[in-house]
Image (cartoon, rainbow, N blue to C red):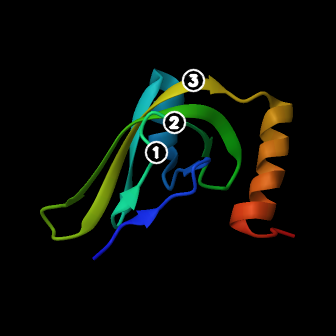
Amino acid sequence: MGFQTEFNSVCKFKSDRELYELLEYGRGKMVKKHFRVFPTGQKVIAYAPDNRAVAIVRIVASIAEINFAGEEVTEVEMELIRKLTDEEARVQTALAHEMFFGDQK
């Protein structure tokens, strides 16, 4: 058992529903498998499930726990700072593919 560290500038959603709630209401949360450490208080780029950069968010809370099913999970609560412009999203997405997600060609 141990903590996995997330890179400081990446917050990738696995669920369209979680991303929709963040963009629609300005606050949201996502659940990740395993224990992870997210930089509470830091601004990060949020990515959609298809690896598109969509917004700048601030991590409000990161809670790692073992749930009732005995699984290690981390809940990350965040607030929307702002959506990215089309140009910002294009550049951030291209950089993320090169640095984090691998070449998608």
Q: Residues within 10 Å of mark 3 (few under 14, many from 20)?
A: some
Q: Nearer the viewer, residue 41 or 50?
A: 41
Q: Amino acid at mark 3?
A: Ile
Name the N-terminal-most of marks 3 and 1. Answer: 1
95 left or right of 51 in image: right
Quarter-of-image position of residue 50? bottom right
**Residue type highlighted by circle 2:** Gln
Q: In the rendering, which numbered label is found on residue 39?
A: 1
Q: What residue is drawn where x is 78% and y is 27%?
A: 85
At x 53% / y 26%, what residue is drawn?
80
Q: Determine whether, in the image, residue 87 is placed left or right of residue 46.
A: right
User: Judging from the image, what secondary structure is the residue with disc 3 in?
Assistant: strand
Q: Position of residue 10 (x, y in %)?
A: 60, 50
Badge 1 density bin: few <14, some 14–19, many ≥20, Cα 10 Å = some
Quadrant location of the C terminus?
Answer: bottom right
Residue 65 marker: none
Mark sitting on residue 81? 3
Residue labelled with disc 2? 42
The answer to whether marks 3 and 2 mark residues whose Cβ atoms lie closer than 8 Å is no
Whole-Å distance between the Cαs marked 3 and 1?
16 Å
Q: Quadrant of residue 88?
A: top right
Residue in the picture at 48% in, 23% down:
26
Q: Is residue 35 above or below residue 25?
A: below
Residue 76, picture quadrant: top left
The secondary structure type at the circle numbered 2 is loop
Q: Give the secondary structure at mark 1.
A: loop
Quadrant containing the N terminus in the rendered view: bottom left
Q: Residue 67 at what x, y percent from top left?
A: 17, 61
Q: How far is the residue under mark 1 from the one under mark 2?
A: 6 Å
Identified at 23% across, 69% down, the residue is 71
Mark closer to the chain start, 3 or 2:
2
